[in-house]
Amino acid sequence: MGKKKRDEEKAAEASTLAAPRLRPGPGPHTLVIDIGGTGIKMITIDRDAQPVNERARELTPKPSTPDDVLEVCEVMVAAQPAFDRISAGFPGVVQHGVVHTAPNLGTKAWRDIDIRAAFEAMSGKRVRVANDAELQGYGVISCKGVELVITLGTGLGSGLYTDGHLAPNLELGHHPLKKGKTYEERVSNAERKRIGNERWNRRVAEVIEQVEPLFNYDRLYIGGGNARRLTLKLPDNVELFTNVEGLAGGIRLWEYGPE
């Protein structure tokens, strides 16, 4: 993808965030929450995945303890327009609403936290929770064939789908890749800053070369905050997506995702 095309997509995303469709829209309304290692984002969308308010964003508190993160979330949730349910993306392994790992939040205190119950208590609404990359993936996949999603942000997230059905908690980022380092250790945001964008792009190319024969996917989608920094030529069956496009995953999580 050329620089002009990437700049156009970046401008389109910025425009969408700056001037969302501020209208009630058809229901049900879903509050989509994205908890990341760097920031906490949320927005309310209608059944067509159109935003009904401007996206809210706050920095993830440091240290990122459950009490501190949930306190920020509670304040943000209270400021949202009316919604009927919540779809939450969390940076780690979540099973039946309970956190098992949270590597990018840097604290073991998250283990066994029932984050779904916490959001239900603060909102009084129905809640579904998934890994953050898996939720984003639901927003962009075609639900046909084998589709792999990776997100490049603080770390590396992943989601694997077959005809729209998720194989949960893949956690590809923590699998060894090269020189004793994991995928995430090779292409994390901290590593990108250390080695520069050019070398980092070559490493992302290595990731693509590795996962293609491993998963034999029909299509690979790459998103996350650092997807816009990619300058390498992508194979025909690989495409980039924006965080805004991933928001639609908040709808599909209720259609396809695990309870």
Image: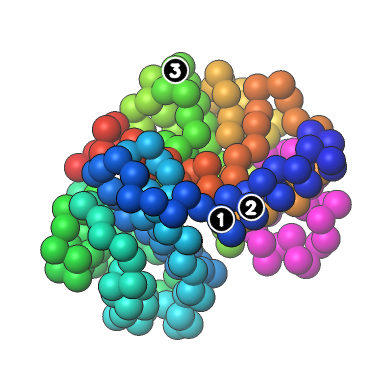
Please tell me the numbered disc located at residue 15.
2
As helix, strand or loop, the secondary structure at mark 3 comes to loop
Q: Give me the C-alpha separation between circle 2 and circle 1.
A: 6 Å
> Quadrant of the rendered structure where residue 208 is?
top right
Reading the image, the residue beneath label 1 is 19
Q: Position of residue 87 (x, y in %)?
A: 31, 51
As helix, strand or loop, the secondary structure at mark 1 comes to loop
Reading the image, the residue beneath label 3 is 144
Q: Which mark is in front, 1 or 3?
A: 1
Residue 147 visible at all: yes
The answer to if 195 sits in the magenta stretch is yes
Front residue of 23/177: it is: 23
Q: Which residues are drawn in magenta?
A: 184-207
Mark 2 touches mark 1? (CB < 8 Å) = yes
Mark 2 touches mark 3? (CB < 8 Å) = no
Q: Main secondary structure of the magenta part?
A: helix
Q: Give me the C-alpha separation between circle 2 and circle 3.
A: 30 Å
- Residue lying farthest to the front in this orientation: 23
Residue occupying the point 25% across, 56% down:
83
Residue 92 visible at all: no
